[in-house]
Amino acid sequence: MSRKPLIIAHRGFSGRFPENTIRAVKEALRLGVDGVEVDARMTKDGVVVLMHDETVDRTTNGHGKVKELTWGEIMRLDAGSWKGEEFSCEPVPRLEEVLSETVGRAVLHIEVKEVGVERAVLRLVQEYDALNWVVIDSFYPEVIKNAYLVEPRVGRILTLGWLEDNDEAGGDLPIQKVFSCAANGLSLYMGHATEKTIGHAHRRLLSVSVWTVNNVGDALRLAELGADALVTDYPDVLLNYLRNENKQ
């Protein structure tokens, strides 16, 4: 493997610890990952919290939509027991806690899950003087465009998931979509990460990350295709392999 892509821990070290918790973030940082990805939503009373789903049902002992619950209600939830008894009482963290924990030890990729939340996220990023080590990610072009208007210095990645317009012949439509919202990078679902798409992005000076890459075989293939970063639930597996490669 001629080049080593960056390793980004998906929702923290989510393969072995409860996703989007401080524990998962700490364990990812302890590994020495290049980046940590977390998901951001806003509570009814305006607190930015880590949660992937629209509701708290899957990963906590609570019920309801994040945006319809107050921080007081969410802070009392158990966000760890679903992953294992040893993680019981792990709380849902506020974004401020993650910024304080990361403090530039890795690039923090904040995936904004709803349009409008990006403004509150950026206020916190500015407050914590974190512009140099934070990237805003989103599936929503509006989020990326708004992030650019609010704070043009912040890194911005448009996530292109289950693309219906993924043009295998050249990728013009995805690339146009990235530029139209002022993103400076794109994140591709692994099944759509082809040599043509990645090369097309690189020729336009766009970085390319790929998700979700959980085994060495896929990592090797994507590295050969030119992926700049791999988003993984198991950063330990990919990092261990890359470190062993460096010793050879």
Image (cartoon, helix red, strand yellow):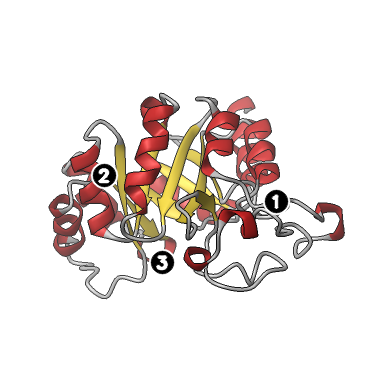
Instruction: Identify the residue position indicated by label 3 in the image.
Output: 191
Q: Tally the numbered discs.
A: 3
Dot 3 amino acid type: Gly
- Residue 68 at x, y = what percent? 50, 68
Q: Say whether residue 135 is left or right of residue 97.
A: left
- Residue 202 at x, y = what percent? 23, 43
Dot 1 amino acid type: Pro
Answer above or below: position of 177 versus 22. below
Instruction: Identify the residue position indicated by label 2 in the image.
Output: 147
Q: Quick check: can you spot residue 196?
A: no
Dot 2 amino acid type: Ala
Element at badge 2?
A: helix
Instruction: Identify the residue position indicated by label 1 in the image.
Output: 91
Instruction: Give the image quarter of residue 189.
Output: bottom left
Give the mark nearer the N terminus: 2 vs 3.
2
Q: Quick check: can you spot residue 84?
A: yes
Whole-number angstrom distance, CA of label 3 to CA of label 1 = 34 Å
Q: Are marks 3 and 1 in contact (CB under 8 Å)?
A: no
Whole-number angstrom distance, CA of label 2 to CA of label 3 = 28 Å
Residue at left offset 36%, top offset 71%: 162
- Between 214 and 65, the residue placed more toward the observer is 65
